Image (cartoon, rainbow, N blue to C red):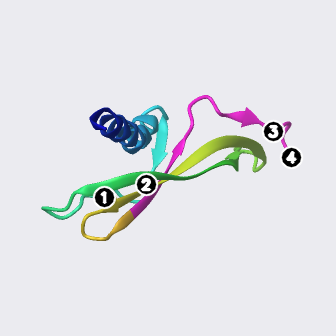
């Protein structure tokens, strides 16, 4: 029974700590503001909300736009005072060109 409890704890710890470790693999994270929780407030969990492809545009000096796609992963942090923070990370190497200038 003790081995089973230890195994269950190890598996649950793997899921809890996998999201923050995975977030560090991405090169560019986007937050609206740098959030500093009040003194005494700690992060309870960090959860991956969704993963999707976003279409973005490079704006050229001539006024044209060049479309491209990047894979974006959205995360949500929950703090002990009940507040949440949502932020996005662009996956490294996910840049996909969508074609010629339009």
Could you tell me which secondary element the residue under label 1 belongs to?
loop
Could you tell me which secondary element the residue under label 4 belongs to?
loop
Identify the residue position indicated by label 3 in the image. Answer: 98
Relative to 90, 31 lies left or right? left
Instruction: Depth check: give the residue in front, 7 or 54.
Output: 7
> Which label sits in the foreground, 2 or 4?
2
Could you tell me which secondary element the residue under label 2 belongs to?
loop
Q: Is residue 89 highlighted in magenta?
A: yes
Alpha-carbon neighbours of circle 4 within 10 Å: few (<14), some, or many (≥20)? few
**Coordinates of residue 52 in the picture (x, y in percent):** 66, 49
Instruction: Depth check: give the residue in front, 82 or 12.
Output: 12
Relative to 44, 27 lies left or right? right
Q: Which residues make up the magenta segment? A: 85-102
Identify the residue position indicated by label 4 in the image. Answer: 102
Mark 3 to mark 1 CA distance (whole Å): 34 Å
| Residue at the far left in the pictured view | 40
> Which label sits in the foreground, 3 or 4?
3
**Coordinates of residue 29 in the picture (x, y in percent):** 46, 44
Identify the residue position indicated by label 1 in the image. Answer: 35
Alpha-carbon neighbours of circle 2 within 10 Å: few (<14), some, or many (≥20)? few
Mark 4 to mark 1 CA distance (whole Å): 38 Å
Could you tell me which secondary element the residue under label 3 belongs to?
loop
Alpha-carbon neighbours of circle 1 within 10 Å: few (<14), some, or many (≥20)? few
Mark 3 to mark 4 CA distance (whole Å): 10 Å
> Which label sits in the foreground, 4 or 1?
1
Q: Residue at x 85, y 36 (%)?
A: 99
Q: Is residue 5 highlighted in magenta?
A: no
**Coordinates of residue 56 in the picture (x, y in percent):** 69, 48
Task: Determine whether label 2 and label 1 are within 8 Å by CB.
Answer: yes
Precedes in sequence: disc 3 or disc 1:
1
């Amino acid at each position: 029974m003790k081995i089973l409890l230890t195994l269950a704890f190890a598996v649950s710890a793997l899921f809890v700590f996998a999201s923050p470790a995975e977030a560090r693999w991405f090169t560019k994270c986007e937050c609206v503001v740098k959030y500093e929780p009040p003194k005494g407030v700690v992060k309870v969990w960090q959860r991956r909300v969704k993963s999707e492809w976003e279409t973005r545009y490079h704006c050229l000096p001539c006024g044209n736009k060049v479309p491209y796609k990047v894979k974006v992963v959205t995360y949500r942090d929950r703090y002990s005072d009940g507040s949440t923070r949502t932020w996005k990370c662009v996956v490294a190497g996910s840049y996909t060109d969508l074609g010629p200038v339009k």
